[in-house]
Each structure stands twice: as structure tokens, then as C-alpha cells.
Amino acid sequence: MGRVEVTPQEFTYVEYDSGIIASLAEELAGRVGLPDDVAISIEIDEELPLPLTGSTADVVDGNAELWFSGANFENGKYRCTFDEPVARAELATNLFRARDRLQPDFASASPDEELAEALRGTWDVWAEGRAVRLGELARRVRRQYVFRLYNGFTDVADAAFDRLWSGDDFTWAELQSISEQCAAADPRPASKRKGVPRKESLKQ
Amino acid sequence: MKKILPPEELARDARFVRVNIQDTIADPRQAKVSERNTGSAKLEPDRPAAADRARQLMHGIFMGEVQALEGAGRTTFDFTDEEVPFQLKLDMARQSWDESRHCEISVKLAEHMGTEIGEFAEATFLYEAACAPDALLRLTGVNRALEGLAIDVFNTMKLFGDHSGDPVLAACEDWMLADEVTHVKMGSDWLRRLTENDPERRELALEFQRTVDKLFSLGGFRGETDDNPIQLARRFRELAGFSTEEIDELSEVTAEAQAEAEAAAGVNKS
Amino acid sequence: MSEPRQPRAAFAPWDRRELPGIFGVEETARRVGNYKWIEMRLFEALGGWVATVPELDVKLVLGRHCYHHAWHSELWDKRLPELREMKTDRLTLPPNDEMIAFVDALREPEAPELTIEKLVGVYRVLLPHKIAAYTYHQNGSSRITDAPTIRSFGFILQDELEDWREGEMLLQSLIETPDEVERAANRQRELEKLIVAAGGIAGPGTIGGETGVPAPEGVAVG
Ligand SMILES: [Fe+2]
Ligand SMILES: [Fe+2]
């Protein structure tokens, strides 16, 4: 038994293999630098198809708890099938964020479901950028689109994106500050900005 | 080259993978999602998975534009000078150019959103409307039903661009929307002209349109309630020659399509 | 300041337009009818092929060029009644059966692996012949009597030349191996023979020569 536990063990609607997912997570956790004594639980909601993606990475009692929509691992060309490069990138990105949460200066970061979209977007860029430097699949423009959606279609946001994507070290306070700078430069009315957590969630 | 090219023969490069739309609608996960209370299904930036939903829809739009281009192109070729008026052929050639530009716009927009060509599977149900061997039915199916769906989709996408403050998306969708209104108007005008003295044939064409409209409502993908990601664009449809009664009727058709899909999937809405 | 009532020549010194052209009204109408016919068969073929070519860039270009030729056919259709043919269909004809054979051969390829054959027919055979025919007619017409036809030639030739270049560039990007060079050359040879047999898009004399050019008509004004 490794330190990774995947739920469900058997998938009904999709052709995913919990053993493969567990071994990928095990390998990536080591490369991401998640300490060996941190247990990892991964819950996958297989009822959610593409494009209903979503994920959370929280730390509870010192252990990493990851939740993914089944869509995050799904191959867009072949319905219900597992896309390994995409799944690896998703796992690595979220494992990075779990590792971040173990750092003392991230102690004040709210759980993912309570995070504002803009801040979550900021953190995701940094995490995915690091995963790409590990050699995982790069979907830079896709990530930038998500970032712009929540942090503004502005030069300030684009410059922030570049810094986050290529940077290795940020503190929680720095991520917050970057998101605030983007908000200050965003000409959209406050109602269109995503400074508050959204009301609905795919996570049940 | 033969007349009437079946959907299986649409030529694609190695990036594209074909899927049957009925398989997607019948995917048991769709029914599971319908049963959940996740709020409005409208495409809005503050809805869950908004970015990926918009990206996938953009890819669907691209595929739809390719098929609309192919359909319009085939209509210039499939009918002889005796079967259709010269002006109708000219309209279809004009539409080919418009759809070709729409493909170009969609590729650029997909790039802007980080979507790769062929990232998602392609369903060819839109092109199928362009395979009717009767020119009147084809015009009605393509220019009234398919192009009408395009109006609804582009309006939804334009609003998404507006609401998310994306300067590129909203502007481009508005240009495409202008063209699609023209295409639907072509359909409305030709339907009237070709059946001026033949009310029976006109009714036959409208019946065909209703069938196609129901199919294109994709079991609740399009409609006028909070459950429908794509909303009927009443104002633009009016500009394109739809009467209020016709739009009301279409609204009923979309509701029927949704009810049938839910019944087939055994959805239990509480 | 010049004196407004001072008589001036009707033609400015730099205006070298002359009478007459080499074709009369009837011959012009016949040719315009041939032009409309070939533009129609061409835009139909391009429209039909869109769905049969897998190359995305080619697909989109064919969709665009389809409209260009449709618009040309519309310009010719509008010109015909001005040339005394009120029932434009009556002159919307191929010049001869050989031209029909050429068009049938041109439009025959369908399979997705035949993009080179499709494009060679249009961009290495038909368009060069159209450009030649239109240029000959344009240059041989009086810019006074037949100015409306010449104006259409101006618009059409601009499209034809640009489309020719675009199609040729697509072909050059598709032809990569000696085998593909052979395919393109064979196809061109096969179709060129057919269009030569037809005498060009307006039949024998399409670009002058012994067979078709009528003697100048009208009054010579020196
Ligand atoms: Fe379109
Ligand atoms: Fe259209």
C-alpha cells in the first residue's frame, strides 16, 4: 500500500484505472517535493464529463486532499477515456498547490472552495508553470485565458501571468498582492471581476 | 465528383476525430449532471468551469463553421441550373465565403482561448441538414435551422465575451452574428419565394425545419430556461425574418427536445 | 483663371481611348455568355470540393474563391441584357462540346487524396486560360463603346490574378516529391489538351489567331 488513496477504486462511467492514477500521483508527488510522510487522498467525481472541469487541493490534518472532476482527466477526442499527459499535468499542478499549503506562509490561505476565482487563478498559473518545468504537458494559452477571465484582459494581468508562469518562489502574500494589482488595473466594473468566491460549485 | 456527399465522406486531416452526437446526448453522465442542482446552466463567467465550457463551445463553433462552409459549398454544386435559380446559387457561394471567414475567425478565437484544432471530437449532425436531396428542404434545414442555431450560439458567446470583458471574443462574435442573420434571412426569403404558389410544399419545408430544429436543440442544450446553456436569440431571429409565432413555436420545440432527452435518460428532477 | 466659355476638346490630350474595338455587340454577348458559363461551372466545382479536401487551408481558400467566381458570373449575367440578350440563360452556354468535356474532366476528381489534381486543373490550367481570354478581350475592346465590359474585366482580372497566385502557392506547398511533380504535370498535360481542343474558354479564337477574330466592326475614327 502506497501513500496515495484514490476514490473510487472502480470507475463505472469512465475508463479510468485508479491504480494508474495512484501510481502517477505517487511518482509526481516525489518530483513535486511533497514530503514522504504526507498521505495523499484523491477523489474523482466520474459523473462530470468534459467540459465540466474543476479541482481542489487542500491540506487537512497534514495530509493532501485532492478532488478532481472526471473531466480533468478526460480525453477530448475520445469520450470517457483517460488522457494521461493531461492527467499528469493536472495532478502535478494540484500537488504543487498542496505542497504550497504545507508552507507556513500559506497557512492563512482559505480552502479552495472558499478562494476567490481571481486568487485561485493566480495560484494555478504559478503551479502549472512549475509542472511544465518538470516536463509535464504545457497548456500555457489555455491557462492564460483562465487567468485573464478572472484577473482581467489587461497588460498588467499579462505581465503578471508571465511572472507567475516562469517564477519559482512566491509567498501567499505575494500571490494576493499580484491579484490585487491586476484588479486595480482591470477596467471592468467590479461586478464583472471575480474577487469573491462563486456561488455554485461542481464539487458535491 | 458525385452529387450529394454523405457526412461520412467529409474530408478531414489527422487531427480530427468523429463522434456520434446521439452517443454524447445518451452519455449517462449527462443525466447525472442534469439531476444535480448546480444552478443556471447559462454560459456565464461566474459559473463553474466557465473557461473550459467556453473553450469547448468555441471548438464546437469552429467545427460548425467548417460544416456550414461545406454545406453551402455543396449546395452550389449539387443542383443543376434547371433545379435551382441562379440567384440561389450565388447566395450559396456568398455564404461559402462568409463561412470560410467564420472558420478563420474561429481558429483565431480558439487560439486566443488556448484550444487546439481537433482537441475535441467532431459530430457531423449539422452537415447532415445539408444532405437533403430537395433544394427547398436543404435551404430550410440549413439556412433556417442550422444558421438559426448559429445565431443563438453566437449571441450566447458574444454575451459571454461582454460579461467577461474579453475584447476580442465579443467583437468577433458580433461580426459573425451579423453574417448569420444574413444567412437566415436568405433562408427565409428563399422559402417564401420558392413556395409562393405552393402552400403544401411550404408546409412540408416548415415541417422539415421543425424536425431539424428539434435535433439541433440537442436535448436541452438550447432553449429559453436556466437549464439551457444556449439561449434563443429572439431579437436577432426577428431581424432574420422569423415571426414572433415562429420563435414561440421554436421555443416549444426546444422544450420538447429537452423533455424527451430527459425522459430517455431517466432524469429525475426534484 | 481659364475662360469657362472657351471651347475645349472632348478628349483631354492625355486621353488616348479609341474606337472601335475588335468585337461588335453580338460577338461580345456570345463571349460574355461563355464567360458566365465557365465561371458558374468553376464556382460550383470549388464549392463542391470544399467538403472533399482534408487540407484545412485549402478548404478555406476554396470557400473564398468559390464566391469570387460566383460574383464574376453575376457581373456577366448583368452585362448580358445590356448587350441585347434579355434571356440571359440563352447565352449562358459553353462554346462547344469540347469545352463540356474539359469541364467534366476538370470537375471529376473527388477523393480526399486528389487535392493536387483538383488544384492543378483550376490554377495551372483554367485560370491561366481565363486570364488570357479576359486580357485579350479587354485589350481588344474599345474603352469608349464597351467601357462597362472593360470595367468588369478590371475587377475580375484582379481577382483572377490574385487567386491564381494563391492557388499556385498552395500547389507549391503541396508538391514535395518527384512523384507529386509527376502527378501535377500529368494532370496539367491531360487537361491542357482538352482545353486546347476546345479552343479556349470562348472557343476557337478565344485569344485571337486565324480562327475566330472577326474583322473590326463599326466606323473607324482616326
Ligand atoms: Fe457561420
Ligand atoms: Fe452561416
Image: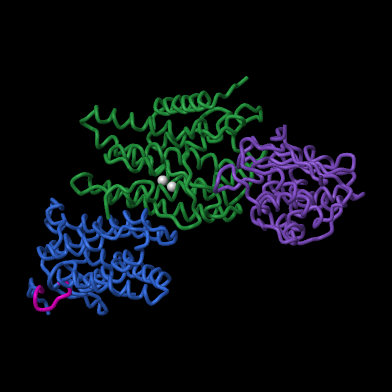
Chain colours: A purple, B green, C blue
Image coords of residue C159 (percent x, y): 33, 65
Quadrant of image for the N terminus of chain C:
bottom left
Q: What stretch is highlighted in magenta?
A: C206-213
Q: Using residue B128 as the reference point, say whether residue C210 is left or right of it.
A: left
Q: Using residue C20 as the reference point, say whether residue C118 is left or right of it.
A: right
Quadrant of image for the C terminus of chain C:
bottom left
Numbered disc total = 0
Q: Is residue C140 above or below residue A128?
A: below
Q: Is residue B252 above or below residue B209?
A: above
Q: Is residue B219 above or below residue A181?
A: above
- What residue lies at 25% left-to-right and 30% top-to-bottom? B201
Chief secondary structure of the magenta span? loop
Which one is in front, C109 or C15?
C109
Residue C169, by quadrant, is: bottom left
Which one is in front, C154 or B242?
B242
Image coords of residue B149 (percent x, y): 45, 38
Q: Using residue A199 as the reference point, say whether residue C32 is left or right of it.
A: left
Image coords of residue A2 (percent x, y): 81, 47
Image coords of residue A121 (percent x, y): 74, 48
Which one is in front, C208 or C106?
C106
- What residue lies at 37% left-to-right and 35% top-to-bottom? B241
Asked if the stretch drawn in magenta spans residue B135, the answer is no
Which one is in front, B218 or B174?
B218
Q: Using residue B246 as the reference point, say whether residue B58 is left or right of it.
A: right
